Amino acid sequence: MIALCRLLIPLLALGLWHPGNAFQVETVAQGLEHPWSIAFLPDGRMLVTERAGRLRVIDDGQLLPEPVADVPSAYVAAQGGLMEVALDPDFAQNGWIYLTLAHGDRRGSATRLVRGRLQEMRWVDNEVLFTAEPARNRPVHYGARLAFMSDGTLLLTLGDAFDFREQAQKLDSHTGSIVRLNHDGSVPVDNPFVGRADALPEIFSYGHRNPQGIVFDPDSGLVWSHEHGPRGGDELNLIRGGENYGWPVATFGVDYSGARITPYSSRPGMVDPKIDWTPSIAPAGMAQYRGNLFEGWHGDLLVASLVERSIRRIQLDGERVISDEKLDLEIGRRLRDVRVGPDEAIYILTDHADGQVLRVTP
């Protein structure tokens, strides 16, 4: 008993454990400026993007003082900056790393996808793969999350730039869509709108507001994405090619002023969400748990929340949502991203000027 008390008292003092808590939370790194995304290199290092335009490296538990040099410049304003970082599924063979960023200036900006390689602490072999069209003069709602599918393609989420929501129903604009690309940025020949004169061939699905989480499940072949609603109406959606997800014609949310956006929460020919979060939780990153460290969690979705300051665990049965549980982590900060590490632990980024990388274990 004395030995157990000696173990627990320091954890209580640090606020990392309390009686009945099923989780332990430890700080891996801190002092990051609005960290946005994290990726794990095979050699044990971690890559973290800062929205301020920097790509940082955590090596052996230490945040290196200097960022990676020669990373493409991002337009940093409001919600814009350097956003997603993700490794190519064949990274061990080709070394490709993918980044998303806001590209442009105050007159107009859009989500851009690039790839390059890390050589020592320099970004090399940069290639611009895709830039959303048209550019918008409102630096918000970029989407910018990535998911790699097993067929050699990738999905990139794109937001509606807030003031241009009606464009999310149009196929001649990337606004409010999810696009599907080959890894080199070219258009897959089997995209749903290829060959239509009135549609951009990259579009995979449309009618989205600001999708900031997307996951491809290799076991089921299903794609899950969540998006920010306005005031209420945050959504979890099952994504299929060619489908219309309703924004702004159908939503459970209202405008920030309280004004009604639409009388409809569902419409024929538009896909209803699997989960509607009203009031809003402001969903940010999303991961699918694959591992055994958290018993019984394999295949569950994990959703980070900015407003609710929580992680949601969503249990699935095929295409059906079984439960939506708020985890008792007691972090108390805005959470921007959640990922599953190679050690099967959960890694969380806090969205603050002094942001952290946190590691969660049972």
Image (cartoon, grey):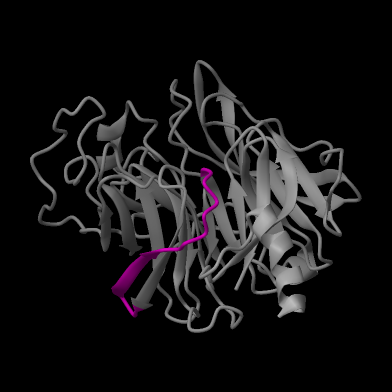
- Disc tally is 0
> Where is the C terminus found, in terms of image quarters?
bottom right
Q: Residue furthest front?
A: 2
In the rendered structure, does residue 325 fall within the stretch colored magenta? yes
* Residue 326 x %, y %: 40, 61
Q: Nearer the viewer, residue 218 or 251?
A: 251
- The residue shown at (49%, 78%) is 297
Tell me if I can see residue 86 in this picture.
no
- The residue shown at (31%, 45%) is 280
Q: Residue furthest top?
A: 107
Q: Which residues are magenta?
A: 317-334
Tell me if I can see residue 102 in this picture.
yes
- In the image, is 182 to the left or to the right of 256? right
* Residue 344 x %, y %: 64, 74
* Residue 183 x %, y %: 61, 59
Is residue 222 positioned above or below 265 on the image? below
* Residue 151 x %, y %: 52, 72
Q: Nearer the viewer, residue 208 or 255?
A: 255
> Where is the N terminus found, in terms of image quarters?
bottom right
- The residue shown at (75%, 49%) is 29
- In the image, is 224 to the left or to the right of 119? left
